[in-house]
Image (cartoon, helix red, strand yellow):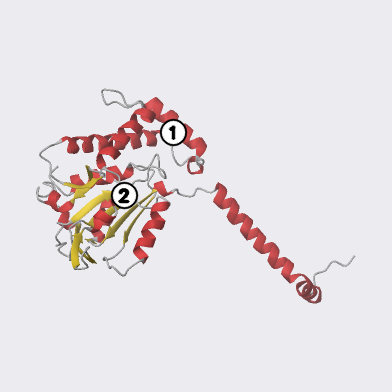
Amino acid sequence: MNNRITKTRLKQLLSYDLWKIIAIIAAGVFLWSLLFTMFGDSLSEGQKLNVYAYNVTVKVSEMNELLKTGGENDFKSYEIRETQFYDFGMYSASNTTTAQQFAAWSSVGQLDIFFVSCNEGIVTKQKDENGREVETKRSLAGDYIPYFYPLETLTGDAFDYLKRYGGLDADGNLDETEIKNYFLDRKRRDNFYRHGQIDADMEVERFGKLLYAANKMKEFLSRDDLDIWYTAEQDGKEYIYGVEMGKLGLRGGNPATGKTPTDLCGVGEIDEVSGSSVASGVALAVFNNKNHQPDLMYESLSFVVAVIERYSDL
């Protein structure tokens, strides 16, 4: 039998079966992509720490330094595999794109940390009951309060998490056995831990970092003399929704490094050389991702504690 592949036979094959070949290749690519998506080590939203700014300026080089991975001062746990800083730009009443982005990203738990202007600099004109035009002023941060996680609630939830899965006792000690058992349970449920890059000792370290952040925030919140908070009233009750960076700056800088909040953020243009800005009027808030990141939402708490310690004398 003559089975030789010749130019003539190859041309005949392509002329009659080309569309079949293309279809087979396309099906193979689709199947490979589907299998990779199902069984590959894709990152969850919780394993990405996303920091956003709106109507304020943030010094990118300083933010990159804060978010960098590695070293004894790294506040993040091994879970954070990717960090991102995104600037929504400056507020404009005619800009509807930002609101759409915000709503879409919030719905999938993509928002973690927010630097936003909190001074009442947004003027809205409307008519009163007599038909006269009046001006009202509001802060941009106030528009997003329903998305924020009160720091008291976040800290309380962190301690509940530590007790439930880390065996935290009344003396403030964690139980390594319980932590490792919980890690094995998570490993069975998550593709990311399947191939051995992560071990149980790293989970013990993660719980240790969370305990440190929860204890520090509890200490800060309990101090009556510490006026650094961004507060707002919701349903007739006042909540602490974040840190007001200008108030934090009034305490002076970090004694070891001399850094203050103005080295990181402000409401005006930031000089990349000197880092000069005015941090007054900037709120640092945390988004409520309890439904999207039940294990990893507390990385945001660690971020806030790191900012307080890095840019003040606390």
In the rendered image, which quarter contains the C terminus? top left
Nearest the eye: 288 or 12: 288
Residue 28 coordinates in the image, percent (x, y): 65, 59
Name the residue type under label 1.
Answer: Phe
Q: Is residue 77 above or below residue 274?
A: above
The residue drawn where x is 19% and y is 38% is: 221
Residue at numbered disc 2: 146
Tell me which corner region of the image, top left, top right, bottom left or bottom right, holds residue 24.
bottom right
Horizontal arrangement in the rendering, residue 43 relative to residue 302 (left or right): right
Horizontal arrangement in the rendering, residue 204 relative to residue 227 (left or right): right
Q: Secondary structure at mark 1?
A: helix
Q: Is residue 298 above or below residue 129?
A: above
Residue 171 coordinates in the image, percent (x, y): 26, 23
Tell me which corner region of the image, top left, top right, bottom left or bottom right, holds residue 142.
bottom left
Question: In whole angstroms, how far apart are the C-alphas of marks 1 and 2?
Answer: 32 Å
Residue at numbered disc 1: 183
The residue most toward the top is 170
- Residue 132 makes an appearance in the image: yes
Horizontal arrangement in the rendering, residue 72 relative to residue 24 (left or right): left
Which is more foreground, mark 1 or mark 2? 2
In the rendered image, which quarter contains the N terminus? bottom right
The residue drawn where x is 29% and y is 39% is: 154
Name the residue type under label 2.
Answer: Pro
Residue 99 coordinates in the image, percent (x, y): 35, 61
Residue 206 coordinates in the image, percent (x, y): 35, 37
Q: How many other residues sit within 10 Å of disc 1, few (<14), some (14-19) or many (≥20)? A: many
Upstream in the sequence, badge 1 or badge 2?
Answer: 2
- Residue 75 makes an appearance in the image: no
The residue most toward the front is 130
